[in-house]
Amino acid sequence: VGQNLVTIKEVDSTNSFLKTLLSNSKPVPEGTVIMAESQYAGRGQQQNKWHSEPGKNLTFSILLTPTFLPVSQQFDLTRVISLGVYEALRPILGDELKIKWPNDIYFADRKLGGILIETHLQGTRIKDAIIGIGLNINQEHFEAGAGNAISVKQILHKDYDLRALLSEICGNIEAYYLQLKAGKHLLVRNTYLTRLYWLNQQRAFRSNGVVFNGTIINVKDEGLLVVDNNSGLQEFSLKQI
Ligand code: BTN
């Protein structure tokens, strides 16, 4: 991952760029990374926009072709990517770094980065996956609308080398990806669980406007969040919680 690295000054979205590249007939090697200094139409999950100050942060997309992975196990790819990003940042940021289900990167209760995976399927298999990663690194100020965003610089008070971090992330993603490819689903699933924000901790949840107390106790193989609401177990998809 990252051997074939294309850097662009400005693009609408690295995910969209990679998607277009794939639809042109020339083959794109697995592990290709498209990195942009600036995106003018960066996309987030659930139709959100992704804002990032030009030149300050990491905004890139990776092409993987996990044809060995059945669609029903797609969430293992989410785990692999989250863990790869997590492990690269962990030595710099320490204990307060967490993965917030399903694939946000959090420092304490603030969002450091996010992941947007877009897959093309072929029958019951995944043909290719465009994996977009946005991480706040050297940005110092966020708009009020950015909610609970935080950057590495706001935590450590110094600039961080984007290229060095990119290569660290790519190396870690590759390592977890190869574990998955070798059939070590359980290892990937268990490790993901141990890094999860709020695991086994009582907190308030909101689902369809209803607030209740509960504890995250598991993430199912297919990615559903399992919450113990003190009178039973409830499963949630991202749209429901
Ligand atoms: C989220 O948390 O909602 C996911 C954010 C993903 C942002 C990255 S930046 C690089 C890639 N290109 C995009 O347009 N989006 C992803």
Image: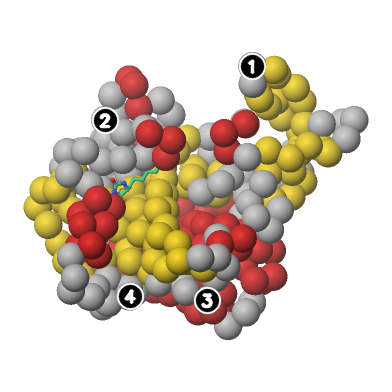
Q: Earlier in the sequence, mark 3 or mark 2?
A: 3
Kindly tell me whether residue 58 is visible in this rendering. no
Q: Position of residue 6 (x, y in %)?
A: 16, 66
Q: Secondary structure at mark 3?
A: loop
Q: Residue at x 77, y 31 (%)?
A: 214
- Residue type marked 4: Glu
Name the residue at the left extreme: 9
- Residue identifier under label 1: 209
- The amino acid sitting under disc 1 is Gly
The residue that disc 2 covers is 141
Counting residues from the start of the chain, the first of labels 3 and 1 encountered is 3
Quarter of the view holding residue 211: top right
Whole-angstrom CA distance, mark 4 to mark 1, is 42 Å
Secondary structure of the residue carrying tag 4 is: loop
Labels 4 & 1 near each other (Cβ < 8 A): no
Do the residues bearing badges 1 and 2 touch, measured as CB atoms within 8 Å? Answer: no
Q: How is the image coloured?
A: secondary structure
Whole-number angstrom distance, CA of label 3 to CA of label 1: 39 Å
- In percent of width and height, residue 87 lies at 49, 63
Measuring 70% from the left and 17% from the top, which residue is drawn there? 210
**Residue 50 vs residue 157, the one in the foreground:** 50
Q: With 110 as the anchor, is 207 left or right in this view?
A: right
Residue matched to label 4: 30
Query: Which element type, helix, strand or loop, lies under badge 2?
Result: loop
**Which disc number belongs to residue 68?**
3
The residue located at (78%, 37%) in the rendering is: 234
| Distance from Cα at disc 4 to Cα at disc 3 | 13 Å
Q: How far apart, in angstroms, are the residues tagged by discs 3 and 2?
A: 42 Å
